[in-house]
Amino acid sequence: MIPLIEATDLTMRFGGIVAVRGLDLAVQPGELVGMIGPNGSGKTTTINMLTGHLKPAGGRIFVSGRRADGLEASAFAALRVGRTFQITQLFNRMSVLENMLVPGLARPHSTRPAATRAARRHLDFLGLAALETLQAKNLSGGQQKLLEFGRALMLDPDILFLDEPFAGVNPVLRDEIIALIQTLHAQGRTFVIVDHDIQALQRLVKRMVVMARGQKIADGPVDEVRNDQEVLRAYAGV
Ligand code: ADP
Ligand code: MG
C-alpha cells in the first residue's frame, strides 16, 4: 500500500539547534498513530514540516506517493493533509461560524452556501451548533479546542495531525474528543496524535512513535514501545 504520508531523512534546524534529525516515518491510510516525547523533542516541528508549515532543511516528504516537501501549507491542505495547533489559532472577534468559513472558503471551487452547509454539519457534529453566532473569544477553552478541530475538518482532510488535543482539557471533554476522533476514524480518516496523555492515547491508538532530542527512538505497537528501555530512559531524563 502507498503510505498516505511518508517522510525520509527529514531534518530541521533552527540556527544551531537540530530540532528534528533524520526522521523516517510512514503512515498508512486508516492508521491511528500516537506520538509522544519529552518537551522540545521535535514533535511540533515534525507536524509543521509534514503539513507544509515549515520547510525541511533536508529530507523528503511524500503525500500518497507525490513529492510534497517544499510545498506551502495551502498545497498540503489541498492534498487533504490537515492539522490542529498546540495553541488554538482562532479569530477571536469573529463568530464561530465565520471562523469555520475562513478555511472553508479558502478551498478551490468553494461557494459560500456550500461552505456554510459544511460548517453547520461539522458544528453539529462537534456540539457547537447552538453557538455559531458567538464570538470565538467568548467560548470556553474546551469549546475553542473543538472549534479548532472544526476548522481543520472544513478542509476535509484524509489525514489529521493533532498537536496536543488533550492538553488543558478536563476529563469529560477529553472523553468527548476521543469519541469524536473514533467516529472520524471509523469514517476513514487517518490520524497522527501528539500528546503527553499516554492513557488517552492508549485508548485510541495501536501504534506509538516516540521522539527524543529530535530523533525517533521507538515506533511500533503500544505494548512494545511502553516496555522499551530507551523510551523509559528518555522519560526518566537520563
Ligand atoms: P515539542 O513539540 O516536542 O515540544 P518542538 O518541535 O516544539 O518540540 O521543538 C523542538 C526544538 O526546536 C526545541 O529545542 C525548540 O526550542 C526548537 N524550536 C522549535 N521551533 C523553533 C523556532 N521557530 N525557532 C527556534 N527554535 C525552535
Ligand atoms: Mg509541541
Image (cartoon, rainbow, N blue to C red):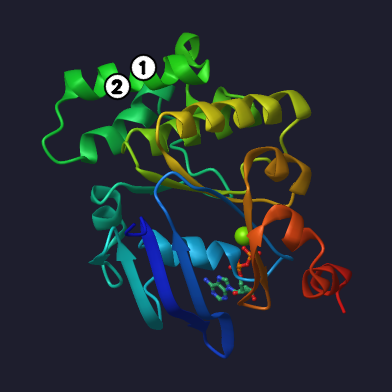
Q: Please give the label number shown on residue 118.
A: 2
In the figure, 65 relative to 167: above or below? below
* Residue at the outermost left position: 109
- Badge 1 amino acid: Arg
Is residue 167 in view from this perspective?
A: no
Gap between marks 1 and 2, in whole Å? 5 Å
Q: Residue at x 87, y 79 (%)?
A: 238
In the figure, 13 relative to 185: above or below? below
Quadrant hosting ligand 1 = bottom right
Q: Which residue is drawn at 61% across and 78% down?
A: 215
Residue placed under numbered mark 1 in the picture: 121
Q: Circle 1 sits in a helix, a strand or a loop, which is it?
A: helix
Left or right: residue 128 compared with residue 2: right
Left or right: residue 158 compared with residue 134: left
Left or right: residue 236 compared with residue 117: right
- Badge 2 amino acid: Ala
* Quadrant containing the N terminus in the rendered view: bottom left
Q: Circle 2 sits in a helix, a strand or a loop, which is it?
A: helix
The percent position of residue 40, horizontal first and vertical second, equals 68, 70
The percent position of residue 14, horizontal first and vertical second, equals 52, 82
Q: Badge 1, how many Cα within 10 Å: few under 14, some, many 20+? A: some
Q: Are marks 1 and 2 in contact (CB under 8 Å)?
A: yes
The percent position of residue 185, horizontal first and vertical second, equals 48, 34
Question: Which image quadrant is residue 156 in?
Answer: top left
- Asked if the beta carbon under badge 1 is closer than 8 A to the nearest atom of ligand 2, the reply is no
